[in-house]
Amino acid sequence: MSRLLETRLPLASGEKLDSGTFNRLVRILELNLGSVDITISPHFNADQISELQFATGSIIFNTTTEIHQAFDGTRFRDLYSHQTYSTGVGITSAVGSVTVSIS
């Protein structure tokens, strides 16, 4: 599970920024941006969901139910109903007949 690091970004005053402050700021941004993938919603199972706190509007993927959910401030609500999609096509056919004789 990835999350943004909780840090205090350095502040600069005046027109010039010293190299130490700039380098610390860049390092903090590198650490934060490297720990978050915004293309994937966070994944949690039912046990984790019951133990953690979420902000209203949070969207997660529930690995127990395999459904995306949104937190309404009180509980998680499914964003869609679970669908099962066929993964292939099958066919059965027969032509003619077969006779087996034992003598």
Image: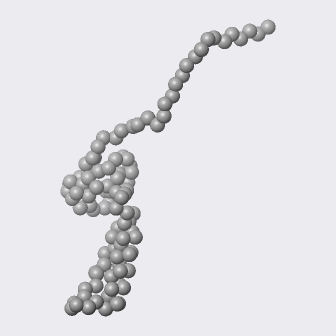
- The quarter of the picture where the C terminus appears is top right
Choose between 1 and 51: the one closer to the eye.
1
Height in image: 77 above or below 36?
above
Judged left or right of residue 43, residue 17 is left
Q: Where's residue 14, x and y in %?
A: 21, 91
Tell me, yes or no, if residue 46 can be seen here.
no
Height in image: 84 above or below 95?
below
Tell me, yes or no, if residue 29 can be seen here.
yes
Height in image: 78 above or below 54?
above
| Quadrant hosting residue 20 | bottom left
For image coordinates 32% across by 55% down, the residue present is 60
For image coordinates 69% across by 10% down, the residue present is 99
For image coordinates 35% across by 80% down, the residue present is 26
Q: Where's residue 4, x and y in %?
A: 33, 70
Choose between 71 and 4: the one closer to the eye.
4
| Quadrant hosting residue 8 | bottom left
For image coordinates 74% across by 9% down, the residue present is 101
